[in-house]
Image: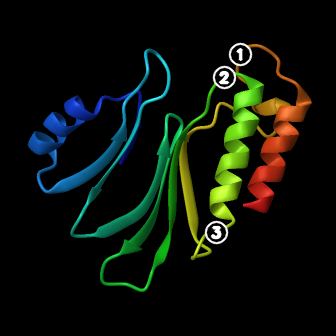
Amino acid sequence: MQEKKCNSNTLGTILSKAWPGSQSVAVDSSGASGGLAIAWDTQAISLTDFHANNNLIQATFHIIGTNIHGHLTNVYFPQDAVNKLALLNTIARINSTRAHPLWIAGGDFNMITKLEERNGGQVRLDMESNHFKDFIQNN
């Protein structure tokens, strides 16, 4: 389970009632921005080697009882283009040292790959979409 805009104390309380035995890693939000969490069933999945900041949590996973290993990334991208590109570069740098080829990423990227995907909001530069497409292809 991945969640954004969360508080680690509230998450711990909810998980202890709703999902006993689960484990979580959270980065608290700072005002109205950031805040992420990953929660998992420790009998099914092992997560290690965490990298975390206000906009991402990344970990290495192993599905217990299998030979399946990979990397999991939960993101909540900022709105401004400069910080978006900086976060793409941070994730690419972390991914350059991945021990396993399988990578699962989820969350809110606040970006699109084609202008046809746009649904409201301000028009962003095509450059942002091109960087995102390059990031997807290279990672």
Badge 1 crowding class, 10 Å Cα cut-off, few under 14, some 14 to 19, many 20 or more, is: few
Badge 3 crowding class, 10 Å Cα cut-off, few under 14, some 14 to 19, many 20 or more, is: few
| Residue linked to disc 3 | 97
Q: Residue at x 23, y 54 (%)?
A: 23
- Disc 2 residue type (three-letter): Gln
- Disc 3 residue type (three-letter): Thr
| Residue linked to disc 1 | 120
| Residue linked to disc 2 | 79
Where disc 1 sits, the SS reads: loop
Q: Residue at x 64, y 69 (%)?
A: 97
* Rendering quarter of residue 128: top right
* Rendering quarter of residue 138: bottom right
Q: Which of 89/64 is in front?
A: 89
Q: Residue at x 31, y 78 (%)?
A: 64
Image side of residue 70 versus residue 134, left or right: left
* Residue 31 vertical placement versus 103 (above, below): above
Residue 106 locus on image (x, y percent):
53, 47
